[in-house]
Amino acid sequence: MTFEKIHSHAVSEWEKLQSSNKPRILVGAGTCGSAAGALDILKAINEELGRQNIEAIVIQVGCMGLCFAEPMVGIVKPGRPQIIYGDLTPKSAIQLVNDYLVNDKPRPDLAMGYIGNGKVDSIPNLFELPVLKPQVRIVLRNCGLIDPENINHYIANGGYSGLVRALKMTPEAIIEEIKKSGLRGRGGAGFSTGQKWDFCRKAPGEEKYIICNADEGDPGAFMNRSLLEGDPHSVLEGMAIGAYTIGANQGYIYCRAEYPLALERLRLALQQMEKYGFIGNNILGSGFSFHIKIKEGAGAFVCGEETALMASIEGKRGMPRARPPFPAISGLWGKPTNINNVETWANAARILQKGGDWYAQYGSEKSKGTKTFALVGKVERTGLIEVPLGITLRQIIYDIGGGILKDKQFKAVQTGGPSGGCLPTSMLDSPVDYESLTAAGSIMGSGGMIVADEDTCMVDLTKYFLTFTQAESCGKCPPCRVGTRQMLGILDRITRGEGKPEDIKQLERIATTVKQGSLCGLGQTAPNPVLTTIRYFRNEYESHINEKRCPALVCKNLISFYILPDKCQGCMICLRNCPTEAITGDKRLVHVINQDKCIKCGTCTDVCPPRFSAIAKVSGEQIEVPLEPVPIKESA
């Protein structure tokens, strides 16, 4: 079957769906939506439709990125725009079926916005909302809007036209198109994608390989997972284009087993590709053949490093090797290999669909295009975002993210995952691009972005990330194996109040050694949290070491809880909720906390009625309180 016939059929199916006289209900049932209760909502909607004998088309879609509003549902009535509803429950979803589908009341109180032509009274255009207006959705353009399990939806929206175009071009012309776009690797290193393909294309050897790195393992990162769940064909099309370009007939997707829905949709997408002739032998009659296998990873963070990943595919322990030779020359089984991450492949597909010049209009001079980020932490609107490179951190955190939770003060943002750097308030107006983040001591990484507020202890946060990287170190090279353990030990002592004045210099010395001497990217970037927090938050280290005080009141060994005698009303709420029975007292007696029994859990402050505010949480100081419960002094 020719692509023209395939495309015509797909467009016909898509238009038939859009013009159906049946209402359509799109349920965001990606991993984040499902975790928030989307499957319960899906069940409730189907049951209510059946109870009322309403014929409707119910589709499970991927994540639109508005994770703060999950679970989300889109409803399209014939001839009207789609209305997106958020923060739903099974009960409110059933109400929507009755109010909107049956009684034509669109419920603006539950709606986030509408999508499509036309207007809906009292409901804004979804893409004019502050969270979406600054975004440019290239990679995420289909997520949440098409059925990821229906290849026709992808094709009808421009899918596989990039592959068809590529098959009519020379590999050299494709590489020039990618170079013209300015696309750089979205896995973190930021190397020119066009040059990378060119190296592999020119490498000697008949047998070559293409690999998609989907081993996303950063804490708080879910960019790749969401894309694979919401639009898997965009990634697969990019891989097919890359394979044709470098002359590879075999490809691998290395995806961690913890992503079951992504794996399920990848397998289905590959079956659909084969049926339509986009993969297999003699693709679309071009004479080019390409096959893809899925390799499930066991969750080792180090396997995100390309040489460790290849070792894992070969059935060996996932450990990095020295370079050169680089994978483009000697990669999988010693053959020339090109590895790109999920987002890079999806961008490549869109570039061949729309052109390199089109893509290059977005972004900054040296960092073209867009980047997806998982915006998480102490920010109002968490989720998956896609922004043009060059946008500032302030625009991301305050315009898109809505600012800091509970109107607290911003303290830092960590970019680049556990190996990224922590950037302070003074860096908020810095552009988000490869060069600027590197100059600030951080990295782009694959796209994790974690926001910290005034209640975050930067020493404790650094210890958390170093705990992760130290545990995930494969142990092959001594700088990483030994150095991360030494740094973690020093950080642990500092947070316990046992730090020494020389510890800061020692941390810097070890961090520099690890950075310069490690074999792979894990070790080379693991010191970034240490170096950037010392650079920008040295005062917090000094407070912990010199004053035995945690300014953010986080480090348990450095904080104490006291019940204030002039505020305690003897209500016994804290006493009843203390998990270690560290509080003594009785009705109408000032309660007392036994400091030896107190585990610093903070339960007492959580349950103390705000009108009393009788619990003081302090660090580096003692408060004069009775040693035993005493009668409450009556106010005059």
Image: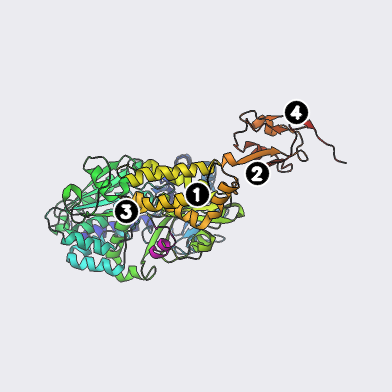
- In the image as oriented, which residue stretches furthest toward the right? 636
Q: Distance from label 3 to label 2 (Cα)?
A: 46 Å
Kindly identify which numbered label has been placed on residue 586: 4
Q: Position of residue 541 (x, y in %)?
A: 54, 50
Q: Tell me the residue that label 2 is attached to.
A: 618
| Number of other residues with Cα within 10 Å of mark 1, as a class: few under 14, some 14 to 19, many 20 or more | few
Instruction: Point out which mark residue 342 bears.
Output: 3
Q: Position of residue 362 (x, y in %)?
A: 38, 68
Real-space Cα separation, disc 4 to disc 2, in angstroms: 24 Å
- In the image, taking residue 250 as reference, residue 76 lies left or right, namely right
Label 3 Cα neighbours within 10 Å, binned few <14 / some 14-19 / many ≥20: many
Residue 587 visible in the displayed image: yes
Secondary structure under tag 1 reads: loop
The answer, for residue 588, to whether it is visible in the render is no
Q: Which of marks 4 and 2 is nearer the N terminus?
A: 4
Element type at mark 2: strand
Q: In which quarter of the image is residue 298?
A: top left
The amino acid on which the numbered mark 4 sits, given as a three-letter code, is Asp
Examine the structure image and report whether residue 438 is included in the region drawn in magenta. Answer: yes
Pointer 3 or 2: first along the chain: 3
**Of 576 and 147, the residue lying toward us:** 576
> Looking at the image, is mark 4 or mark 2 nearer the viewer?
2
Q: Do the residues labelled 4 and 1 touch (CB within 8 Å)?
A: no
Q: Which of marks 3 and 4 is in front?
A: 4
Q: Label 1 vs label 2: CA separation?
A: 26 Å
Mark seen at residue 502: 1
Q: Which amino acid does label 3 sit on?
A: Val
Q: Is residue 103 left or right of residue 592?
A: left
N-terminal label among 1 and 2: 1
